[in-house]
Amino acid sequence: MAGGGGRAAVSLLTKAAQAAAGLGLAASAASTALYTVDGGQRAVIFDRFRGVLPETSTEGTHFIVPWLQKPYIFDIRTRPHSFSSTSGTKDLQMVSLTLRVLARPDVERLPDIFTSLGLEYDEKVLPSIGNEVLKAVVAQFNADQLLTERPHVSALVRDSLIRRAREFNIVLDDVAITHLAYGPEFSQAVEKKQVAQQEAERSKFLVARAEQERRAAVVRAEGESEAARLISEATAAAGTGLIELRRIEAAKEIAGVLARSPNISYIPAGDSSQMLLGLSGAR
């Protein structure tokens, strides 16, 4: 009886192990046959017999044939990319520019992108076409025009780059020049030009001031001449009485100054007149 019970237990355990193994294999097969596409992503399926399938998988969980098929996930959201380039202008000046673009793949052409470029399509394409477009556009302008006509330059770069990216099934939502710097030779030339302009403005100011001073001298001389003429006419009309009056006023002012001076003494003479003596103070 005991032996029969043991064999039954062993048989039960064996069946349980087999069932567990079957469940494990089924779970493993199910996990390899399922894959998930997150939001903002698409999947391109590679089939060992048919190659890259023309249809892409959208968000959600999907079935594939294990070993026979393999999914490759693409991020289709817009992502920023920046790259720099040193280019020569029309007047042979070197300019450093930094370009920022917002790029995403063309969802309808993801199988073609995967076939020709792979998952790292943006890193393979954008820097090369960006440098190409920047050099081609910058070469059409002089160094100073890059500043004075910057909107026009940015528009040319944007249109050219969008057109070139389309050839690789890449969509550019925005293109902008974020940095522009000139070489040291051009910067020194600009600084010298500014100094020369300041010196020219200073020279203009000195010339204008000299002209104003000359005009003021002419006006002053004309005023003095007119005053002398008026005095001469008044003297001729009224006689020398005005001159005598001015002389008396001047003598009165001089007498007042002498009277307030401590070194002047008045010594009476024999007649009604007075003698003025200047006495130096003791030192």
Image (spheres, grey):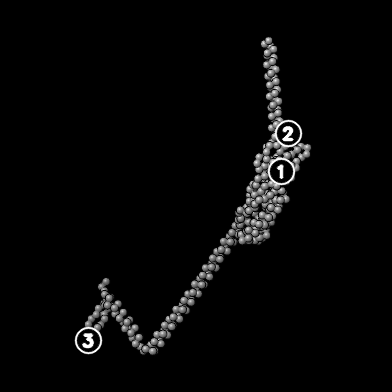
In the rendered structure, which disc, 2 or 3, sits on the residue that comes first in sequence? Answer: 2
Q: Please state the horizontal and vertical placement of residue 214, each as a whole percent of the image.
A: 48, 76
Write down the residue under mark 3: 271
Residue at 23%, 86% in the rendered image: 272
Q: Please state the horizontal and vertical placement of residue 31, each as a whole percent of the image.
A: 69, 32
Write down the residue under mark 1: 118
Quick one: 198 or 25, which is closer to the camera? 25
Give the image quarter of residue 73: top right
Query: Can you tell which mark lies on residue 66?
Result: 2
Dot 1: element: loop
**Amino acid type indicated by mark 1:** Gly
In the rendered structure, which disc, 1 or 3, sits on the residue that comes first in sequence? Answer: 1
Distance from the alpha carbon under mark 1 to that under mark 3: 133 Å
Dot 3: element: loop
Quick one: 214 or 7, which is closer to the camera? 7
- Circles 1 and 3: CB atoms closer than 8 Å: no
